[in-house]
Amino acid sequence: MTKHHQKLWQPSSEFLLSSNMQQYQLWLSANKGLDFHNHHHIWQWSIENISDFWESIWQYHKVIDHGSYESVLANEQMPGSDWFCGSMINYAEHVFRNRTVDHPALIFQNETSCDRMSWSILEDKVYAIQQFLISNGIRKGDRVAGFIPNIPDAIICFLAANSIGAVWSCCSPDFGVETVVDRFSQIEPKLLFAVDGYQYNTKHYDKLEATEYIRNNISSIETLVLIPYLDSDAKLPNSVNINDIYKSDRGDKHLTFTPVEFSHPIWVLYSSGTTGKPKAITHSHGGVLLEHLKYLSLHNDVKRGENFFWFSTTGWMMWNFLQANMLLGAVPVLYDGSPGYPTLDTLWQMTEELPIHHFGTSAPFLAACMKAELKVSDKYDMSHLRSIGSTGSPLAPEVFDYIYKHISEDVWLCSMSGGTDVCTAFVGGHPYKPVHKGLIQSRALGCALKSYNGNGEEMIGELGEMVIEKPMPSMPIYFWNDEKNIRYHNSYFADYPGKWRHGDWIKIFDDGSLIIQGRSDSTLNRKGVRIGTAEIYNVLDKISEIKDAVIINIEQKDGSDVMPLFIVMADGKPLTETVKTKINRELKSQCSPRHVPDHIYEVGDIPYTLSGKKMEVPIKKIFMKMDMSQSMNRDAIKNPEAIHAFVELSKTLDLSQI
């Protein structure tokens, strides 16, 4: 229970009364005759009455409907739920209804400069791209792809494509070219937007050759638009310079929007693709519109005119989440470059100067600031900062302490967890609840999330499988080119028919707060006891000699198991017997004897996916002597040399025999 977890933050009366959640509940009372005693009661209502709940989100946010829906949810079956049949909407139209001269449309900063873009200029550019798309034969349902970093052009091109009902898909230019081809070739885009290169840590990376390769290896691409980001004179044969498109004058013509069905595809996102062809996860216009309005408004408390930042590349779903705050009239803060250049102070300095009201990042970045002993509040004014969002992996309890001690004692820490699968969070912040050390505050409204044991029974206070019992609008409508939805079904519904198994271990407490303990498919089944890898990483994060680590557990044929720990030592620190003893002692005392590894090995680096996930499962498969040559795509790995080192290590280290 949360009584064992230290309370670090409590919403003030002013915070609570001014929250979007409070305004929504007052609206429910006035318009629906619904009154709720606490946060749990409204969550319970939202999952027991899912049609009423999602219709209330539609009505509260005044969704623009050019049609007329016959029912909110005609079919509750998963997969295959039918939402708001008969409605005709457009996502981009809901963005542009927030035009204003009171604040910029977006803010862009890279390693050398910071710029603000007005709504007028944004609309001019989106209109120009929209007309270019139309003149080049792009129509509703056609796919438009982007090979673009997190720069304004990415949002401009997405909004233009979206405005005419085209389907957007984007990859970050730090992806390997085969990774990009593997993704885009599945959806057969007719047009490609691509940059000449990108910058990171002051270095420039030319991508003209990569762009040419992508075009030549995806036969469906008919038109290439080059974005000269690094070099204004950059050229590619048989391409159009985006700046030439932007020069067109719209005069007194207005941006128009093509209404599409609620279930019409809005974009295609991709799974990591580290052990197989990436899944082309396809979401709907209406599903993400409603979900983003709900989560960003009610669970992130984003307000009109606030500056909303999330450190992300365009290859991570958090980019989609970042630009979605424009639906609420907030200002997305885009950043392209290294978060550590010239120092880890950079993003915090930016937070003071812009200022940033909502700061989003990954758990590893916050942990890196902690390990660097960065005392943010001593150097920068954090008084404008309202929330810190963290996702990507579990946030260690010690990082909670660090944030409140060295960043801001008043900030609302919103640890959240969701995924590319739904382009949102299942669990995260709640403005009514306190923040307790190491805990995620709440399940999201409309998300019927439970913890199941091996028999499919709900559990409270015990580690179990994360299962969603009822449909959500932003669940994928399908995977692109997935005949008969076989991959889709097997990804989520094979274990609990009609219910979504997400693949995370979760522990839910009786007050609704919870802990994510890592992926259930990488869970350490240690002598019959299930251990989330996050439990071990939380302890290791406190050991100064360790820079990074990954742990796996390999079950043997005789029923036994072996659990090796691989660690990257901090600069200048050797792996000594003293360090090993310290690791084992801390794991035993803070967790249990079962958490102590059988062996500790030093490695040079830990492999991560492009979306920042430790590659625990592929590493386990390597040491189980499974043939990974045909199933592992090295271009889908952030640091492929690291996984290669594990492959080489497995040749001399036979864990199956230990």
Image (spheres, rainbow, N blue to C red):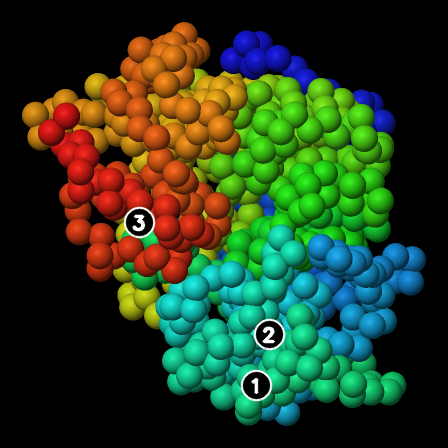
* Residue 77 seen: no
Q: Residues within 10 Å of mark 1 (few under 14, many from 20)?
A: some
Horizontal and vertical percent position of residue 1: 52, 13
Q: Nearer the viewer, residue 90 or 358?
A: 358
Q: CA distance from mark 3 to mark 1?
A: 34 Å
Q: Residue at x 34, y 23 (%)?
A: 531
Element marked by disc 1: loop
Element marked by disc 3: helix
| Residue 97, above or below 348 | below
Quarter of the image with the C terminus is top left
Element marked by disc 2: loop
Query: Where does label 3 land, which residue?
Result: 644
Q: Left or right: 438 with respect to 234?
A: left
Query: Where does label 1 land, which residue?
Result: 236
Q: Amino acid at mark 2?
A: Asp
Q: Left or right: 558 with respect to 280?
A: left
Between discs 2 and 3, the one toward the N terminus: 2
